[in-house]
Structures are given as C-alpha cells and as structure tokens.
Amino acid sequence: MTATIIIHVAGIKMHERAYEIVLKDVFEEEAMDLIESIQTFFNQSQEKVKPQIKLYRKNQKFHKLIRARLKKVNMHSLNWETTIGTAEATSTGLLAGLCWTVKGCIGAVLDQFVNIKESPEFKVTPVFQQRLVNSNCTCIFSMRLGQAIYTMMQVGKWNSK
C-alpha cells in the first residue's frame, strides 16, 4: 500500500513524496475491511445528501433572483415607533435594548437589499410603570409595474423547473 503526501502553498506544488507502507498479513485484512466499510459509509452518505445539495442549489438560485429583483424596489419612507414596558425597570430596559437591536438589524437588511430614498426613523419608548407593547410602522415602498411583472415571470419560470 502506498501513501502520497503533497504539499501546496498558495496553489503551487511545493513538495510531493510517495511512501510505501508495509502491513503485516494479519493487519492487512483488517485494514482492507476498514477501508471497505469507510467507502461504503461514504457512498451511502453521499446518496443521502444529494437531495439536500440539489435543494440548496435551487434555493441559492432563487435567493439570487430575489436579491436582484429587490434592488429595483425603492423605499421612500419608514417610520417605526414602539412603546414597550413590563412594569419592572430592569426587564423594561433590556426589552427596549432588544427592540433597538431588532430594528437596527432590520434597517441594515433593508439598506442592503432595497434602494433607500430617505433614512428610516426608528423610535423606542420604554414605559417603566406598566405592562405595555404598542408598535406602529408606516412605510412606503414602490416598484415599477413592468419590474413587478418581470419578477413574477422570473419566479414562475424558476418555480416550474
């Protein structure tokens, strides 16, 4: 049995050497059984994973299509006000901070995927004396009718494959 060691640095082959491995007769059968069982396990695993890989590639193409289409969407305004309280100061403060975090993440995602004409306005008001959750979101998005029709045609085409 031979083993070959090849060392690549930045894609350039730097070293290659073959080693001869001599196994005793007793261990050779066990090694062959081990190699066969590993190959069988690998082949069975590949067959189980193939549908997931196919679905992943299909979803990846869909996400690419949606990202390209979302670049045609314009966000003219976004105003999101939230009033939150738990009647306890510490948990209200934590919840208000969490609310700011979620809103910031949503704003970052919107900034990445759509064209923002005017910066969004976020407001979080903590109420320390009572239990309350009130959220009001007003937004204006626009997309040209031709782009919307083209997007629906692309999604239909993707879905039929």
Image (cartoon, rainbow, N blue to C red):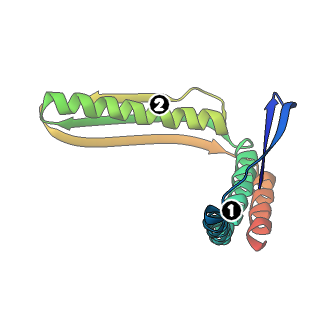
Name the spot of residue 64 as percent of width and height, x first.
74, 50
**According to the image, label 1 marks what residue?**
53
Q: Amino acid at mark 2?
A: Gly
Q: Secondary structure at mark 2?
A: helix
Name the spot of residue 11 as percent of width and height, x first.
85, 32
Mark 2 or 1, which is nearer the eye?
Answer: 1
Q: Which mark is residue 104?
A: 2
Name the spot of residue 123 as percent of width and height, x first.
38, 28
Residue 105 in view (yes/no) = yes
- Residue at image location 38% in from the left, 30% down from the top: 100
Q: Amino acid at mark 1?
A: Ile
User: Label 2 vs label 1: CA separation?
Assistant: 33 Å
Q: Quadrant of the C terminus?
A: bottom right
Q: Quadrant of residue 26?
A: bottom right
**In the displayed structure image, the side of residue 77 where residue 131 appears, left or right:** left
Residue 80 in view (yes/no) = no
Name the spot of residue 151 as percent of width and height, x first.
76, 57
